[in-house]
Image (cartoon, grey):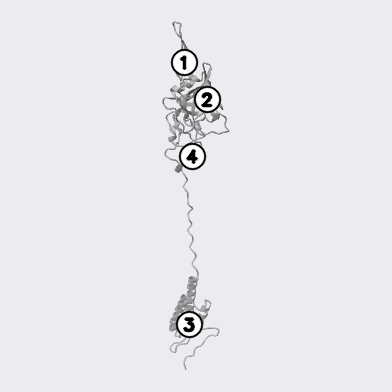
């Protein structure tokens, strides 16, 4: 009769316990779980071989049961299953996310500033520089050129070459060691002169004779008691009107009372002499009219205004008479005809 196997009440075989231990993790245990169960089974078989029991709880016929060895085998199996469960849990748990590395805040380098000289008010052309005209201000270095004025030491003894606006840095090229004059003086060429005459709405062409215009100058005078008009200067340039050198004319602005003319040196003397005995009238020229007046229009008298008066430049025009008293008591009378002095005919 073969050896009978027996079970303790309430006990179960190793395979049943292993099955129960794995049921809690689903019908398909993981590979690690299977490895743990296999290791437990192998250990159980080795313990059974030492104790004389078969792996399925049956005693071998050639060895007696040993309760101590059976308990040791069960404890070993339990430890193996426990290690397998721990390994399974460690594998199933998701790895902790990596700790983010803090990013250092970006640092912005400060913008380098440079002290420069800035005019506190507009500086007129030709004016000598003075420290009170400027203030020092900080400006970004990348906006400053090599020629930008940075201190007043660069401007000592210099003059403004052109008008310099306020509130902005400026270049040393706007300074000059030469003392500049005003715009009127700069426009007087060699051999010419500038002189000023009084005008009104009539003699100044209603104010249209302004800077940049060209005019003829006529002298209105009395010659031997006869009114005459004589052209004394042609094509004179107007440099300024009422001290304004701006050629633009505002119709609403007042009519100038003075005009400065640019004429040759000899013509300047003629105009100056004419102002002592008569009045001057300006005749405005067109912008493209640069020619000379005809000889017949140099002098006109009241007789030339009369109907039937001779025309043309061939007839003599008596402009006046001159009497010369000699040492011998004789008096010679001369006539001014067409600008020339000739002896008066008897």
Outermost residue to the front: 308
Q: Dot 3 corresponds to which residue?
A: 70
First in sequence: mark 3 vs mark 1: 3
First in sequence: mark 2 vs mark 1: 2
- The residue mark sitting in front, 3 or 4, is 4
Q: Is residue 336 above or below residue 283?
A: above
Label 3 SS = helix
Residue 270 x %, y % = 47, 21
Label drawn at residue 138: 4
- The residue mark sitting in front, 2 or 1, is 1
Foreground: 32 or 120? Answer: 120
Q: What is the spatial separation of the Cα atoms under label 3 and label 4, in whole angstroms?
A: 96 Å
Q: Dot 1 corresponds to which residue?
A: 335
- The residue mark sitting in front, 4 or 1, is 1
Foreground: 167 or 69? Answer: 167
Label drawn at residue 281: 2
> Counting other residues with Cα less than 10 Å from the Cα at mark 2, is it few (<14), some (14-19), or many (20 or more)?
many
């Amino acid at each position: 009769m073969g050896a009978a196997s027996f079970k303790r009440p309430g006990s179960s075989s190793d395979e049943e316990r292993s099955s129960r231990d794995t049921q809690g993790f689903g019908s398909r245990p993981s590979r690690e779980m299977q490895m743990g169960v296999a290791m437990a089974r192998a250990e159980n078989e080795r313990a059974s071989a030492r104790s004389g029991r078969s792996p399925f709880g049956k005693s071998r016929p050639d060895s007696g049961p040993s309760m101590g060895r059976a308990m040791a085998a069960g404890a070993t199996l339990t430890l193996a299953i426990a290690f397998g469960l721990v390994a399974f849990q460690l594998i199933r748990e998701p790895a902790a996310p990596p700790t983010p590395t803090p990013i250092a805040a970006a640092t912005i380098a400060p913008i380098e500033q440079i002290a420069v000289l800035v005019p506190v008010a507009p500086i007129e052309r030709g004016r000598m520089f003075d420290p009170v005209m400027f203030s020092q201000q900080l400006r970004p270095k990348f906006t400053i050129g090599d020629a930008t004025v940075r201190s007043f030491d660069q401007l000592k003894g210099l003059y403004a070459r052109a008008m310099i606006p306020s509130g902005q840095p400026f270049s040393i090229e706007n300074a000059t060691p030469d003392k500049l004059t005003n715009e009127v003086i700069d426009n007087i060429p060699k051999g010419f002169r500038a002189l000023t005459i009084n005008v009104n709405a009539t003699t100044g062409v209603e104010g249209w004779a302004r800077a940049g215009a060209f005019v003829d100058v006529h002298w209105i005078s009395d010659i031997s008691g006869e009114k005459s008009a004589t052209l004394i200067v042609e094509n004179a340039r107007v440099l300024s009107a009422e001290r304004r050198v701006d050629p633009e004319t505002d119709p609403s602005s007042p009519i100038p009372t003075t005009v400065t003319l640019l004429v040759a040196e000899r013509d300047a003397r003629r105009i100056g002499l004419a102002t002592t005995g008569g009045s001057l009238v300006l005749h405005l020229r067109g912008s493209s009219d640069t020619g000379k007046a005809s000889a017949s229009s140099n002098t006109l008298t009241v007789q030339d205004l009369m109907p039937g008066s001779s025309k043309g430049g061939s007839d003599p025009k008596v402009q006046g008479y001159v009497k010369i008293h000699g040492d011998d008591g004789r008096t010679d009378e001369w006539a001014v005809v067409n600008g020339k002095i000739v002896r008066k005919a008897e």
